[in-house]
Amino acid sequence: MAAENLAVWPEIEKVEKENRRELVLQGGAVDEKIKKSGGIHQRLYSLNLLNYLEISQCPSLHELHENIKNLSHLQSLVLCRNKISSVPRSIGELKWLKVLDLSVNELQALPEEICCLSELTTLNVSCNSIAALPDGLSRCTKLCSINVGKNALVCLPEDLFSPKLELLNTVIASENIIEQLSSDIHNLPALKVLDLSSNKLSEIPFELADCPKLKDINFKGNKLKDKRLEKMVNGCQTKSVLDYLRVGGRGKGKGKQLDTDGAEQSDRNRNVSKRRMLLNRGIKRRKMQWMSCRKWLLKSFMYLIPPLP
């Protein structure tokens, strides 16, 4: 039986009568209605005053109707922990949408129209089976956070490292099969958190150290060619990793970074300084020991000399 031919769900009817701006549908009772209706009741798509819609924990929900475009004032759309396998292209018409959460579903791809969401600040599509992100994400110029962890991504699109994304501060792409991180990562001036743990990276670009606000990085679970760097990474030593990259590591860095010979010369200079410091300490200690011994000898000698008559 088609969803539109069934009685209006009481949750939808209440929002409609009271002109509410938020609607949350979740759990077993809602899932049962979706199963019986064959989807979300069509009346939901007429609630054009909604600015927050959440439909979650409903394994019977496999798709979203294209009429989602009718919710023209929607700012947050949370569709997590369902079984959604596709997103309609009409989602790109939600011009005021700021938060889109499609995590823990069965998506294999995202429509390119997502890149038309110019007000989008948060995109969460983690825990799906997405093999590639659409090109054009740089058009989402207000994007602050993107979570694509636990998918099947081989790479991140070059467009994600565009200077246009000057507000992007969090990139989470853990547990994928990403083989390379673009050297254009330094184009993200607001980047604070970067998580690429459990991927297939063999190198970390030196340009990462040129991200001025970067505070938290995670590259654990990647087999890096530079074993010294891999040890730092697995020890969660963010500052050490960035410092190492900043001086070029064992290769050549960018701009202000030193080349390998310069780094090695710095290491030699530090070792020489350390040896000199240890030598000076030893000389000072021996001098103090000699002074103590001299005082003792003088006292002893005084006792041996007989007093004058």
Image: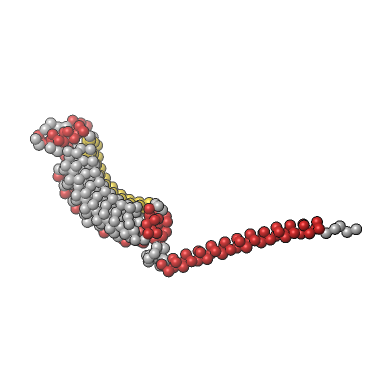
> Who's the residue at 90% across and 58% down the image?
309
Q: Residue furthest right?
A: 309
Residue 41: % across, % down: 14, 36
Q: Can residue 126 be seen here? A: yes
**In the figure, residue 38 lies in which quadrant?**
top left
The residue located at (48%, 66%) in the rendering is 268
Q: Position of residue 56 (x, y in %)?
A: 23, 38
277 to the left or right of 84: right
Most foreground residue, 300 or 208 = 300
Q: How many marks?
A: 0
286 or 234, which is in the foreground?
A: 286
The picture places residue 280, in percent across and down from the top left corner, at: 60, 63
The image quarter in which residue 232 lies: bottom left
**What residue is shown at x 22% (from left), y 54% (from top)?**
132
303 shown above or below 104:
below
Residue 104 horizontal/vertical position (percent): 24, 43
Colouring of the image = secondary structure
* Residue drawn at (57%, 61%) of the image: 278
In the rendered image, the vertical position of residue 83 relative to residue 261, given as above or below: above
Task: From the viewer's perspective, tell me whether residue 290 is left or right of residue 214.
Answer: right
Q: Residue furthest bottom?
A: 261
Q: Foreground: 167 or 213?
A: 213
Please state, as top left, top right, bottom left or bottom right, where the N terminus lies in the image.
top left
Q: Nearer the viewer, residue 22 or 225?
A: 225
Q: Is residue 115 visible?
A: no
